[in-house]
Image (cartoon, rainbow, N blue to C red):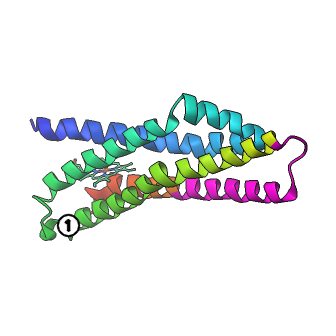
Amino acid sequence: MDLFMVAFRILHIGSAIMWAGGAALFFFYIEPTITAMGPDGEKIIGELVGKRRMPIYFAAVSTFTVLGGLILYWRDSGGFQVSWITTSTGLALTTGALAALVAWIGSNLLIPRAIETVGAIGGEMKAAGGPPSDEQMGRMHAAQERLRTIGMADLVLIGIAAVAMASARYLG
Ligand code: HEM
């Protein structure tokens, strides 16, 4: 029995499930709820980010996925041997890994920043009192659109990684 591979596969696949599930829930439910709340979305963001520290969840599960994956990749490729990387299985896993690395940047840098921007504009609107100005509404819509686009791109990249990884060993 190869206990090393069993342990790292559980770490890798378990974290990947939590990352992909979290990203889907965010894109399909949390982001639309924040957007529908307009300036009040700031309250939800304060609770999710400020109090419940949602970015730490994504940082942990995405980093465990990538680190666990890197160790599996290193073992499978015999220490990054080009002869393995260029097989169909190696190429599929490499494609999935690259998609996942870009998704890591989205989940940990771009999405948290975009959420903060939406929250900050909502806070500004509420602090000013009265109906928001056209300029504020324009900035809010642009920030919400950016959050939605990055969330969708992140989910697509995670989906590419999952499909590539799940099929890799049967391609060769
Ligand atoms: C969202 C990101 C990811 C998802 C959803 C994901 C998913 C999976 C799944 C489901 C498997 C099992 C495939 C099988 O049993 O045949 C797997 C295996 C694997 N993954 Fe990932 N993965 C992700 C990211 C990564 C990254 C970033 C790397 C490398 C840097 C990586 C490297 C590997 C390797 C080498 C295997 C094969 C392990 C073995 O030989 O048993 N993965 N991945």
Residue 140 on the magenta segment: yes
Tell me the magenta residue range. Answer: 128-153
Does the closest atom of ligand 1 sit within 8 Å of the Cβ of label 1? Answer: no
In the picture as drawn, the residue positioned furthest to the right comes out as 130
Residue 168 placement (x, y as % from top left): 29, 58
Query: Which residue is painted at 79% across and 40% down in the image?
Result: 127
Q: Is residue 65 left or right of residue 24?
A: left
Query: Which residue is painted at 43% across and 56% down in the image?
Result: 105
Q: Nearer the viewer, residue 162 or 170?
A: 162
In the picture as drawn, the residue positioned furthest to the front comes out as 128
Q: What is the tally of numbered marks visible in this picture?
A: 1
Q: Quadrant of the N terminus?
A: top left
Q: Quadrant of the C terminus?
A: bottom left
Residue 107 placement (x, y as % from top left): 47, 50
Query: Which residue is painted at 13% across and 70% down in the image?
Result: 83
Could you say which quadrant of the image residue 130 lies in? top right
According to the picture, the residue beneath numbered tag 1 turns out to be: 85
Could you say which quadrant of the image residue 141 lies in? bottom right
* Placement of 114 over or under 85, stated as above or below: above
Q: Amino acid at mark 1?
A: Ile
Q: Is residue 128 visible?
A: yes
Q: Nearer the viewer, residue 102 or 89?
A: 102
Query: Which residue is painted at 86% across and 49% down in the image?
Result: 132
Our reading of the magenta stretch's main secondary structure is: helix
Residue 147 on the magenta segment: yes
Residue 150 placement (x, y as % from top left): 57, 57
Give the crowd class for mark 1: few <14, some 14-19, many >=20 residues within 10 Å. some
Q: Is residue 37 visible?
A: no
The local secondary structure at tag 1 comes to helix
